[in-house]
Amino acid sequence: MSERLSQQFELGYTYTRSTGPIVGRFLTELRQRRIVGTRGDDGRVYVPPMEFDPVTASALDEFVEVADCGEVVSWCWVSEPRDSHPFDTPFAWALVKLDGADVPMVHAVCAGRDEMRTGMRVQACWAEETRGYITDIVCFEPEAQGKGP
């Protein structure tokens, strides 16, 4: 019979990382309840902003403000949220293409299962107190609804 070896181990990150000028600006704007992206070499607007053009690899530094509302282009329903999910009630993960952006971003949508559909209009539901985190947008919700989770 072989002896089993074990050792206590805690995974930790002993360093800090700066958000840099691109992501830092995005987060700072979120704190002000504004959403910005960057314009790529071909004119497309990326939200969240990208530091480098995905086609040409050139540095991007032109910021573009976009709307806090847009269209669901794809989604996946979460009927049984887990502890790691942002909500304890059913919701959708969705690709939301904000007005003024060309590339959709992933975020949660708080809507009933029967309401969710590709092409639906949604708006950001902002946190009561914004801190410069992606969670300043609590979720997106059907555009005219005007309620949070």
Image: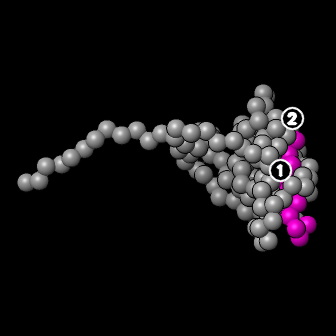
Q: Nearer the viewer, residue 79 or 83?
A: 83
- What residue does disc 1 label? 122
Gap in Å between the C-alphas at discs 1 and 2?
Answer: 20 Å
Mark 2 secondary-structure assignment: loop
Residue 115, x across and y down, in percent: 75, 53
Write the residue at 18% across / 48% down. Answer: 4
Camera-nearest label, 1 or 2: 2
Residue 117, x across and y down, in percent: 76, 59
Residue 9, x across and y down, in percent: 36, 40
Mark 1 secondary-structure assignment: strand
Quarter of the C terminus within the rendering: top right
Question: What is the basis of the colouring in this image?
Answer: one colour
Which kind of residue does numbered mark 2 sit on? Answer: Gln
Residue 32: which disc?
2
User: What stretch of residues is rendered in magenta?
Assistant: 34-43
What count of labels does the image hold? Answer: 2
